[in-house]
Amino acid sequence: MAEFDVIVIGAGPGGYVCAIRCAQLGLKVACVEGRETLGGTCLNVGCIPSKALLHASHMLHESHENFAKMGLIGAPPKVDWTKMLAYKDEVIGQNTKGIEFLFKKNKVTWLKGWATIPAAGQVKLGDEVHSAKSIVIATGSEPTSLPGVEIDEKTVVTSTGALTLGKIPKSLVVIGAGVIGLEMGSVYARLGTQVTVVEYLDAVTPGMDAEVAKTFQRILGRQGLKFVMGAAVQGVAKARGKATVTYKLRKDDSEATLDAEVVLVATGRRPFTAGLGLEALGVAVEKRGQITTDGQWRTNIAGLYAIGDAIAGPMLAHKAEDEGMAVAAVIAGRHGHVDYGIIPGVIYTTPEVASVGKTEEQLKEEGRAYTVGKFSFMGNGRAKAVFQGEGFVKILADKETDRILGCHIIGPAAGDLIHEICVAMEFGAAAEDIALTCHAHPTFSEAVREAALACGDGAIHA
């Protein structure tokens, strides 16, 4: 008889959510985690600590740029980097201890250590072998680098090292203009660092709505970030505690260099599955390292499932959470479902950027007729009151049915506003449904309603 009904490997957002949901559905559950704390990359060295630093640095910006405008007079605060890092660590501690509490509350056993899967239905930690009817791989992902770029987490860092630098660098080169690079670049730019972003493509945040991406880069440029676009990094040389980044411009193949105290490599992530023993077990894996699964998150090995960053799809904590709950339902004999067409993406800079569904570029490529409803935050009274009138809401709707196909927001609280659209899309709503829904005044959400109105007869405050 199996020792556990389910063993989940990995206690990140996908893993711990899966373990808790399995327990709530009446299963005997264990969760394996090798870190000293639960929560995975997200809570320890990713989503949560970066948001703490984004918040702290934004408060600094507000004190220097906007306090006096509001009649708040006084000497602008200075940065105590040690205390700021301590605040960040306290936030991490509160969240990771919260997961420990939830495990105890739901009677989830925490198996501490790094796991291998020696055979179907078995998980090994050190000399101990545990058995389970079902095993879920939720091991997350790790940062990738580039040829000629050696990570030391001191001078050349990933997002992990960028969260624990010994001092605020005078200069920072960010390789990659994706979410991680722009968020961390934004933090250090607010703290006084000269930040230069080097990107291989010609636009920031690949896959984002082109109009939003263009606006986003322009706003970040005004905040002090410099951009070198269309540049292929050739290597990074380190000397005397500093680094030199060499790159070639794609347009003319010319070569140039950038010097910086710190280089942040933010070129993406890959599934973290090394050491599990997948090859010996015969688990099918995609070319890019993702574990192959079917529509119910099953691998080709009976009783073995995989979710989150370890499988195909966007590497997002909330996508992993959804899959964690869905696979728990499947294991418990229920129906598990994830709507991959309605998974929002958010960048937590100021302004925030959020999107869900199709972009204009995708709709044009599909040849689908659509309407665009757009509204600027300059027409939103609440946004202007808090000095965040930059940006806009864009809603894309089917030209014939008015059904919402996508939404793209750059502006205040975009990461929260996008969920009104997510819920609407889940119910197959039309833009008119949003337009006819009363929104409280004054709120940022009125901009979403105005964009919906713009899909029809027109926005009121445009």
Image: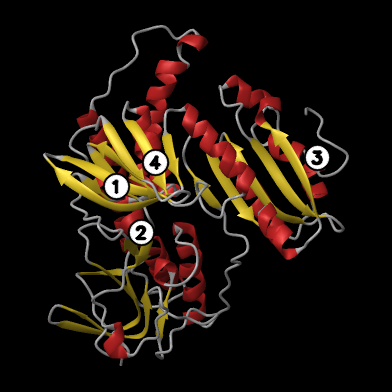
Give the residue pinned by disc 2: 102
Tell me if I can see residue 163 in this picture. no
Of the two numbered discs 1 and 2 on the same chain, state the one appearing first in sequence. Answer: 2
> Is label 3 in contact with label 1 (beta carbons under 8 Å)?
no
Residue bearing the label numbered 4: 197
| Residue 244 placement (x, y as % from top left) | 23, 42
> Upstream in the sequence, badge 3 or badge 4?
4
Density class for disc 2 (Cα within 10 Å; few <14, some 14-19, many ≥20) is: some
Asked whether, in this view, residue 243 is left or right of residue 63, the answer is left
* Amino acid carrying mark 4 in the image: Val
Q: What mark, if any, has residue 454 been given in the picture?
A: 3
Q: Nearest to the eye among marks 3 and 4: give it.
A: 4
Q: Looking at the figure, which quarter contains the N terminus?
A: bottom left
Q: What amino acid is labelled 1 in the image?
A: Thr
Q: Are marks 1 and 2 in contact (CB under 8 Å)?
A: no
The number of callouts visible is 4
| Callout 2: SS | helix
Vertical placement of residue 336 versus 51, above or below: below
Amino acid type at image mark 3: Ala
